[in-house]
Amino acid sequence: MRKYTIIGPLLLILIWAIIVHLQLVDKFFLPDPWTVIGRLFEVIWNGSILGDLFSTLERVVLAFVVSLIVGLPLGLWLGRSEKVYRSVEFIIDFFRSTPASALFPLFLLIFGITDKSKIAVAAFASMLIIIFNTAYGVMHAKKSRILAAQIMGATKAQIFRWILFWESLPQTFIGLRSAVSLSLVIIVLTEMFIGTPSGLGRKIIDSQITYEIPTMYAIIILTGIIGYILNLLFLVAEKRVLHWNGK
């Protein structure tokens, strides 16, 4: 099925080229795809974008690692008792449903206009996604396996370690993939609107302000490619770790 993956990008480029050819949008504001793709290769080849790329990736990785370290244990702990989870469900769902952009001012007040505020708001939003999915996975583990383990005399700790934890992993990986994507989105967004010396978000907004439109589109495409690659890496890891899933 991998051979069909190329159809989507080719279809997008075709539609883009048709829109430009028919002049449905001013060519100044929507350059043809070949110009944008050429600019993308140019900024990568000459290395002018590498500093911004590494800055963004560093913030994304830090935000995701923090959310993982905090969110995974909390999700596992909350999922062990549905009553405990239900008691804090409103708090989790409330902040999970609140747009991260609405929380920017709060984190700016606490951490200031620094990388800490960007990483903190991304980590907070991603952490809630991980908690929700991990707890959901634990709570919806197959009852038949738990019952079989209890009949054989397994302790609660053994049931959690050998059944609940592994049963929760498919749902947990969904949360991890969503969390890393959300971290990238929030980091790029904060780089655009919160003072920062480097980052893909800063490069996008600078290109827009100076009307370097092809560069702006090239960086947007680069950001999308990074998000796709991160998701793909987690899919590969998921298949390796959960090779038993569904069996």
Image (spheres, grey):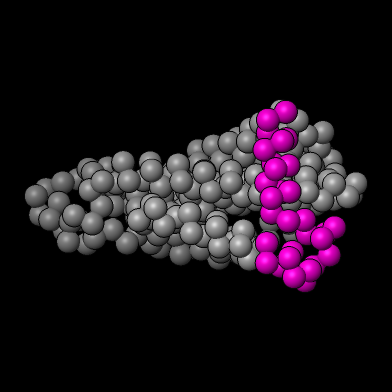
Residue 77 seen in this snapshot: no
Residue 13 is situated, as x and y percent measured from the top left of the image, at: 62, 58
Q: Nearer the viewer, residue 94 or 202?
A: 202
**Magenta span includes 37:** yes
Q: Is residue 190 left or right of residue 126?
A: right
Region rendered in magenta: 17-46
Residue 107 is situated, as x and y percent measured from the top left of the image, at: 75, 47
Is residue 162 depicted above or below 247 in this figure? above
Residue 210 seen in this snapshot: yes
- Which image quadrant is residue 30 in? bottom right
Is residue 205 depicted above or below 85 in this figure? above
**Which residue is located at x 34 percent, y 59 percent?**
139
- Which image quadrant is residue 60 in? top right
Is residue 61 depicted above or below 81 in this figure? above
**Which residue is located at x 49 percent, y 48 percent?**
231
Residue 105 is situated, as x and y percent measured from the top left of the image, at: 80, 52
**Magenta span includes 124:** no
Q: Main secondary structure of the magenta part?
A: helix
